[in-house]
Image (cartoon, rainbow, N blue to C red):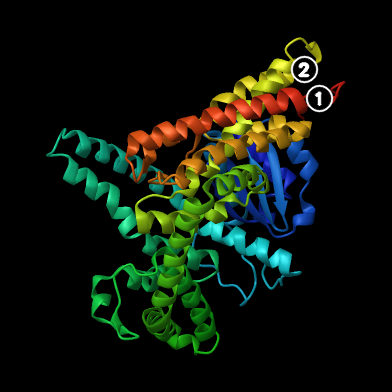
Amino acid sequence: MRNDPVSTATAVLTLVGGPANVTSVTHCVTRLRVVLADPAAADEEGLRALPGVLGVVSDGPAWQIVLGPGVVDEVTAAVEADVAAAAGAARVRTTARPEPAGAPSGEPGARSAGPVTAFRTALRRIAGVFVPLIPALIGCGVLAGLNGVLLNTGRLPALTPALSAIASAFLALIAVFVGYNTAREFGGTPVLGGAVAAVVVYPGVAKVTVFGTHLAPGQGGVLGALAAAWLATRVEKWVRGRVPGALDVLLTPTVTVLVSGLVTLYGLMYTAGAVATAIGTAANWLLATAGAVAGLVLGGLFLPLVMLGLHQALIPIHTTLIEQQGYTVLLPLLAMAGAGQVGAALAVYVRLRHDASHVPLRTTIRSALPAGLLGVGEPLIYGVSLPLGRPFLTACAGGAAGGAFVGFFATLGTRVGATAIGPSGWALFPLLTGNRGAGVAAAIYGGGLLTGYLVGFLATYLFGFPRRPRVGAPA
């Protein structure tokens, strides 16, 4: 029976130290993400044992509580309501929240403990910028795929221009949304971040000459928008700390937009454009020269990234490739990790079919498999393979095999890409495209999934258990 989201939210808040200990609330497809003022006040073991919680990832003040698709939306809404009611809506970071310069979000005045912590914090913040954009990326990507089918078949010609406009508008202005979220994530005024990032996509930049050439609207893409909005946040904090209060409302936004806008035009757009071009060139070169090896490495290592909650940090790279080429060639490779996970879970189910002591584990597998087939891997990771140990490694082997399969065809000159990010597994089929068309891309991707299922299953069935398995149902 499905747990009541309000009860789950109440229990979660109690175990993270109460509503007053929560400074930020957000969520992605499967995870409730909270930032805690005092991480020591949270009870990680209690959270893991909570009914409905599939896993917990803690990284200093940033905690991710895996609840699964659908459920996470309802629980997040209840958590936000409780936090707002108990501590005031200002405690939830939905508008600008001034912070001391250099303080990580949700950690006023705190400093990084070292390079590893700083790196993890940077990845978490990048994820905080892009995760809220995923629903729009998915929706527009699906519409773009549908529009492509209609164009290729010649059906509904009167509708395709409208679909094209709807599907393309968000991506054309994504820099503004990235700028808004970046400023919010780094403690600035969101609308100022959006205003500066809007410079990147404004058509009038074509009249600006830098290093002897005219800028192109959109040059630098999301990377330029991210850098511009981050700079705007730094400038805003610097100015706000030095101007009289009576002039703050006039001078701070003016200086912020002026200084950050000029630096964006005469430096960041050009630099970010070069970086974005290098990313696209590197991805194409890697797949063309070592596609199978690249696919094996990417498919094999993606599950650990998902386990640690670091996979969202790849979103800027995916988005950059989509802006440049119309699709990301990396997502279909990474999606193979989910296929290996499904194959491993099926092997566990079969191996334990005669063991009455593992009925709860088999029930968990049955309930989590549909989500796994649609590319949502956390329920199987935290509920099945990770608690068992070896099946997690054999699932990675399945992902590596599927990635190598798809990458091999890239070496032969056939690239498989996705027009949007977010779903994987079977849910990625409507978003598939490539340099040989959607049909060929779907066939190769389907072959990769079958390879991942098969290798994940066989590796787990043959090597995923000790001679006398000692496994237990997850907590």
Picture residue at 77% right of the left edge, 24% below the top = 473
Among numbered discs 2 and 1, the one appearing first in the sequence: 2
Residue receiving disc 2: 358
Instruction: Give the residue type at disc 1.
Output: Gly
Near-viewer residue (37 or 332): 332
Near-viewer residue (386 or 88): 386
Task: Tell me, yes or no, whether the two marked residues, 2 and 1, touch with CB atoms within 8 Å.
Answer: yes
The outermost residue toward the left is 158
The disc placed on residue 350 is: none
Q: CA distance from mark 2 to mark 1?
A: 7 Å
Picture residue at 35% right of the left edge, 40% below the top = 142
Tell me if residue 126 comes above or below residue 133 in the rendering. below
Is the C terminus in the top left, top right, bottom left or bottom right quadrant? Answer: top right
Tell me if residue 330 comes above or below residue 184 in the rendering. above
Q: Percent position (x, y) of residue 103?
A: 65, 72
The disc placed on residue 472 is: 1
Near-viewer residue (319 or 263): 319
Near-viewer residue (65 or 448): 448
Picture residue at 46% right of the left edge, 41% below the top = 409
In the image: residue 421, left or right of residue 164: right
Instruction: Give the residue type at disc 2.
Output: His
Picture residue at 41% right of the left edge, 46% below the top = 413
Q: Percent position (x, y) of residue 224?
A: 43, 70
- Residue 415 picture quarter: top left
Q: Percent position (x, y) of residue 240?
A: 51, 83
Judge whether residue 53 can be spotted in this image.
no
**Secondary structure of the residue carrying numbered label 2:** helix
Tell me if residue 119 comes above or below residue 420 in the rendering. below
Q: Percent position (x, y) of residue 369?
A: 59, 25
Crowd band around label 1 with a 10 angstrom C-alpha radius: few (<14), some (14–19), many (20+): some
